[in-house]
Amino acid sequence: MDEQTAGAGTRPTSRLVVDVVRALRGWVVAAAGGVLLLGCYLGVSKETDVAFQLPYVVSGGFGGLALVLIGSALLVADRIDASQATQKRLASQIDDLHTLIIAAAANGAASGSPAEHTANHAAVTDADATVSGPTGQRY
């Protein structure tokens, strides 16, 4: 989690707040670019002489286009960050599940004959038991 400094100490910032602020930042920058492009269009449309239209295109058009591209890049970077966080979470869950499977296999091998293991396995499957991982995740 991100940390905020407030006076004497630090406090963790909610991950939801951080994600919303990151997405909002991209949308605000892109919207500002759209406003500049709209201003450029309105300025150019009221002028008939190309020499008077050029300053609107240079200042509003290129600046607005740059802001729209930067806002889009911020939104894409936010989505990439979110997908990487999801991928890390899934990898952690797979590791937990792998640990549980290895532990169950070791317990089954230590319990005795394969017939006992098959009977125990059928009982667990029929009971629809849930198994908790080391981090408290249920499977």
Image (tube, rainbow, N blue to C red):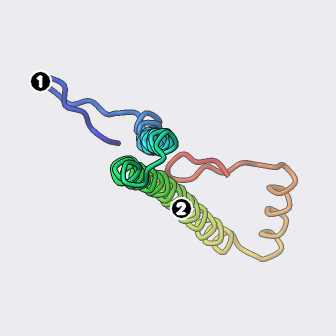
On the image, which quarter does residue 124 sit in?
A: bottom right
Work out how far the residue at label 1 is from the one at label 2, CA to CA, in angstroms.
36 Å
Please name the residue shown 40% across and 38% down the image.
18
As helix, strand or loop, the secondary structure at mark 2 comes to: helix
* Residue that numbered label 2 is attached to: 87
Please name the residue shown 53% across and 58% down the image.
83
Residue type highlighted by circle 1? Ala
Label whose residue precedes the other's in the sequence (1 or 2): 1
Which residue lies most toward the front here?
A: 49
On the rendered image, what quadrant is the N terminus found in?
top left
Give the image location of residue 98, x and y in percent: 59, 68
Tell how many labels: 2
Q: As rendered, which of 15 and 51 lies closer to the eye?
A: 51
* Residue that numbered label 1 is attached to: 8
Please name the residue shown 13% across and 22% down the image.
7
Give the image location of residue 48, x and y in percent: 48, 47
Which residue lies most toward the top here?
A: 7
Image side of residue 119 versus residue 31, left or right: right
Give the image location of residue 4, x and y in percent: 24, 33
Q: Is residue 22 visible?
A: no
Neighbour class for label 1 at 10 Å: few (<14), some, many (≥20)? Answer: few
Neighbour class for label 2 at 10 Å: few (<14), some, many (≥20)? Answer: few
Give the image location of residue 75, x and y in percent: 48, 51
Residue type highlighted by circle 2? Gln
